[in-house]
Amino acid sequence: MAKIGLINNLWVLVCDGRKALLFQNVGDRVYPKLETRETFEQTLQATHDIGTDEPGRLFSSADGRRSAVEPTDFHRQEEDRFLTMLAKDLDRFVTQHGIKDLVVAAPPRALGVLREALPQHVRAVVKAELDKDYVALPAYEIEKHLAKALAP
């Protein structure tokens, strides 16, 4: 994907598995100004609070050996569910606001889940993907990081 810079009217999605921020650049390449258009957030319980059962065991019928089965990561399932719902909300935003240029910044695993969940017409407006976790940063810090990463 080409480095397009923080052009005017560029939309930016910054997310991870529990929080997402949707920004619109109302400035230009020289003086970007990201304004928050929407915030999505969910509270997650710890996996040990959700699933309290012990890991399962498998028994080999040939020699009677036992082995442990990895427990289900309910926390990760909730993050994936959040990202799937985020993709639906993003589809609504692209349609309602006529978004033409979108940049997505998320950790690698979250990017993978989003790629699978986004409809084709939304993927078509994604101009760049950054495998970075900026969601905990303030908007002015996100501007700095994006301006540097997207510089043409």
Image (cartoon, grey):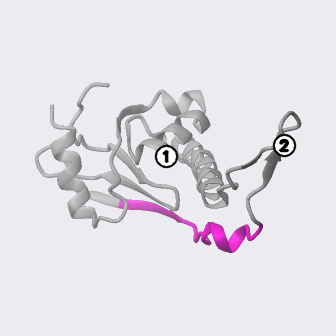
Task: Tell me where the magenta segment starts and ends, as one range.
Answer: 36-53
47 in magenta = yes
Task: Tell which of 32 and 137 is nearer to you.
Answer: 137
Report the residue at 48% width, 27% height from top.
124
Mark 2 Cα-neighbour bin, 10 Å: few <14, some 14–19, many ≥20 = few
Q: Locate residue 121 relative to residue 144 in the image: left or right.
A: right
Q: Quadrant of the N terminus?
A: top left
Residue at 58% across, 45% down: 87
Q: Is residue 103 above or below residue 16?
A: above
Please indicate whether residue 96 sits to the left or right of residue 30 in the image.
Answer: right
Q: Residue 89 versus residue 149: which sits nearer the camera? A: 149
Which marked residue is nearer to the observer: mark 1 or mark 2? 2
Rendered view: 43 above or below 112: below
Label number found at residue 110: 1
Residue 121 at x, y = what percent? 55, 29
Image spot of residue 24 (x, y percent): 35, 52
**Residue ranking furthest to the front:** 63
Neighbourhood count class around disc 1 (C-alpha, 10 Å): few under 14, some 14–19, many 20 upward: many
In the image: residue 101, left or right of residue 144: right
Q: Is residue 40 left or right of residue 126?
A: right
Asked if the stretch drawn in magenta spans residue 69, the answer is: no
User: Could you tell which of marks 1 and 2 lies nearer the N-terminus?
Assistant: 2
Q: Quadrant of the C terminus?
A: top left
Residue 85 image point, x, y percent: 63, 51
Of the numbered discs in the image, which one, if any, rests on residue 10? none
Q: Amino acid at mark 2?
A: Gly
Q: Amino acid at mark 1?
A: Ala
Query: Residue 55's x, y, as percent?
Result: 73, 59
Q: Which residue is mark 2?
A: 64
Helix, strand or loop at label 2? It is loop
